[in-house]
Amino acid sequence: MKLDWPEFQLHCHDGHLVFHWRQYGIVESNMKHCSRIQLLPRSPDGLSPWLFHLRFPAGPTPGLLVVRVDVPADRSREAEEYTDLLRRRYAVPEQPEGAEGYAGEIENAGDTEGPEEAGAPEDPAEETGFQRVPLDAQEWLVAPAGAASEELFGAVLAHVDSD
């Protein structure tokens, strides 16, 4: 399986994943370390972030490597198809089981219809409200967060509580 774009190539063969930015460098990993693949919605700059989470839980130095490829609008279809192929072939989820956080809740915080009015089943997350991702959760790239991030988080929660 191979994607070949100007200045970038993504290749997966026999479970070996290779990201190659022709003028910058190469990142290689075994697909068994890929715990998540996500193609996010297009941002205002017209690019869609394509995220690959490569988790190394065992060994003397466990870690997480997140590879981000910014996908141009005219390549989105190819990236979607490649993502689907990798997910099916290597059983990689979009979101790992048990991954929780408040990001999805914040995205939906402006909805005015409740689940009953929208005809959707009741969401258990609504009962618990906003909750912080535990510092030892795998979703953290950097923990603890810096002072400015903590201040922003506090301001957002205060604003949500006041609504």
Image: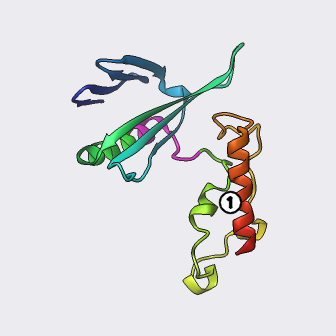
Q: Residue at x 29, y 19 (%)?
A: 22
Residue 113 horizontal/vertical position (percent)? 58, 82
Horizontal side, residue 13 vs residue 4: left or right: right
Q: Is residue 114 above or below residue 28?
A: below
Q: Residue at x 68, y 60 (%)?
A: 156
Region of the chain picked out in magenta, as a range: 86-95
Horizontal side, residue 154 vs residue 10: left or right: right
Q: Is residue 32 above or below residue 41?
A: above
Residue furthest out toward the bottom: 117
Disc 1 is placed on an element classified as helix
Q: Is residue 136 above or below residue 130?
A: above
User: Residue 40 colored magenta?
Assistant: no
Q: Residue at x 68, y 48 (%)?
A: 98
Would you say residue 124 is visible in this rendering?
no
Quadrant including the N terminus:
top left
The quarter of the picture where residue 70 lies is top left
Residue 59 horizontal/vertical position (percent)? 69, 15
Would you say residue 52 is visible in this rendering?
yes
Residue 140 horizontal/vertical position (percent)? 66, 38
Horizontal side, residue 152 vs residue 1: left or right: right
Horizontal side, residue 117 vs residue 60: left or right: left
Quadrant including the C terminus:
bottom right
Asked whether 28 or 70 is in front, the reply is 70
Residue that mark 1 sits on: 156
